[in-house]
Amino acid sequence: MGREEVRLLLDDVVRRPEEWPAPGGEEAVDVFGGRCWVVMVAYVGGLEVRDVGWCG
């Protein structure tokens, strides 16, 4: 259940690049779902997930 929720959140994040942090890896962004979250940074070549959490 938790893994699926996090996967769906990541799928949603990938579809909304306008909400990504500035490339360079210095600015982290927290993105929240219903019962999960991810902390990510952006680089020119893509995103790096730094933390994933789920409460449930």
Image (cartoon, helix red, strand yellow):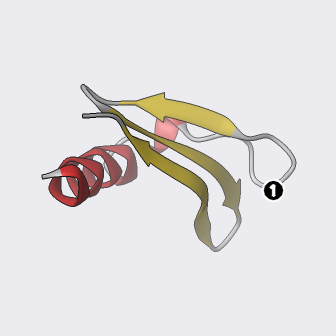
Please tell me whether mark 1 sits on a helix, a strand or a loop.
loop
From the viewer's perspective, is residue 30 above or below residue 42? above
Question: Callout 1: 10 Å neighbours few (<14), some, many (20+)?
Answer: some
Residue 51: % across, % down: 59, 53
The residue most toward the left is: 1
Residue at image position (81%, 56%) is: 25
Residue under pointer 1: 25
Q: Is residue 47 left or right of residue 36?
A: right
Residue at image position (74%, 43%) is: 22
Asked where in the image residue 42 lies, by quadrant, the reply is bottom right
Q: Quadrant for the C terminus, please.
A: top left
From the viewer's perspective, is residue 55 above or below residue 13? above
Tag count: 1
Asked where in the image residue 48 lies, by quadrant, the reply is bottom right
Q: Amino acid at mark 1?
A: Gly
Q: Nearer the viewer, residue 47 or 37?
A: 37
